[in-house]
Image (spheres, grey):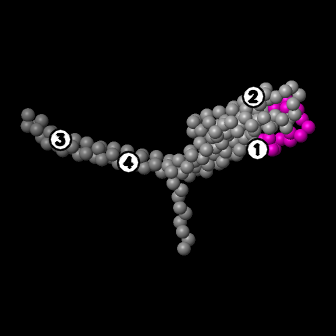
């Protein structure tokens, strides 16, 4: 029994010291991991934020390019039929979409859904405008009909998507404040 008490005299303080050191090392290690993750996220933010902003810019440009008033200005409607213009408009919108669809990587799912909805509504506006015309109508007539149909919307689909994207960019800046560069005074 005396030997057992002698062993306990050395073992209990050693165990207390071991668990104390273990607890402090574990806490310190967790804090260091958290600190490293935070620093990594800050560096990641510095790299990804410019790419995200560029994606928003490109998607807004895409929306501007396919808005009925802008696309009709870019595509010459003089001397072509409504059918040919409709095909040209559809091809142009699809081409613009394919050129910009990788930008969805950098925007929220909700934003991308708004962009897709705007693209599809724009295609639908042109298709429905075409069905409202007489067979053999001119491209200019299709353009005029499409613009009249767009006027029926409180906010045109492409503008609604642009407004949503701009709102999301503002929220992005709210969550990730811009770092001020050190002054060189």
The residue at which mark 2 appears reads as 128
Mark linked to residue 31: 4
Q: Nearer the viewer, mark 1 or mark 2?
A: 2
Q: Dots 3 and 1: beta carbons under 8 Å? A: no
Which residues lie in the magenta part? 71-89
| 153 on left or right of 73 | left
Sequence order check, earlier mark of 3 and 1: 3
Please identify the residue farthest to the bottom as the structure is shown. 185
Numbered disc 3: secondary structure: helix
Which image quarter holds the C terminus? Answer: bottom right
User: Seen in the image, is 128 located left or right of residue 104?
Assistant: right
Find the distance from the CA under tag 1 to the CA under tag 2.
18 Å
Question: Can you tell which of label 3 and label 4 is closer to the viewer?
Answer: 4
**On the image, numbered disc 3 is attached to which residue?**
12
Res. 156 mark: none
Helix, strand or loop at mark 4: helix
Residue 73 lies in the magenta stretch: yes
Q: What secondary structure characterizes most of the magenta part?
A: helix
Residue occupying image coordinates x 82% and y 28%: 133
Q: Which mark is residue 70?
A: 1
Taking depth in this image into account, of 9 and 110 the one nearest to the observer is 110
Question: In percent of the image, x 63 and y 45: which residue is there?
Answer: 56
Is 107 one of the magenta-colored residues? no
Residue 25: x and y in percent read 33, 46
Neighbours of disc 2 within 10 Å: few (<14), some (14-19), many (20+)? some
N-term-proximal mark, 3 vs 4? 3
């Amino acid at each position: 029994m005396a030997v057992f008490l002698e062993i306990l005299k050395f073992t209990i303080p050693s165990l207390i010291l071991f668990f104390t050191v273990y607890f402090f090392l574990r806490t310190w290690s967790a804090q260091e991991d958290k600190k490293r993750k935070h620093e990594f996220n800050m560096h990641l933010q510095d790299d990804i934020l410019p790419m995200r902003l560029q994606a928003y810019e490109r998607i807004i440009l895409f929306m501007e390019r396919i808005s009925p008033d802008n696309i009709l200005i870019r595509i010459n409607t003089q001397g072509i039929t409504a059918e040919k213009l409709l095909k040209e408009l559809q091809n142009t919108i699809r081409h613009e979409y394919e050129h910009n669809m990788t930008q969805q990587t950098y925007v929220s799912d909700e934003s991308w859904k708004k962009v897709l909805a705007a693209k599809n509504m724009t295609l639908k506006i042109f298709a429905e405008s075409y069905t409202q015309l007489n067979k053999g109508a001119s491209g200019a007539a299709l353009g005029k009909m499409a613009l009249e149909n767009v006027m029926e919307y409180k906010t045109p689909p492409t503008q609604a998507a642009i407004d949503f994207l701009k709102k999301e960019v503002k929220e992005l800046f709210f969550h990730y404040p811009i770092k001020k560069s050190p002054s060189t005074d």
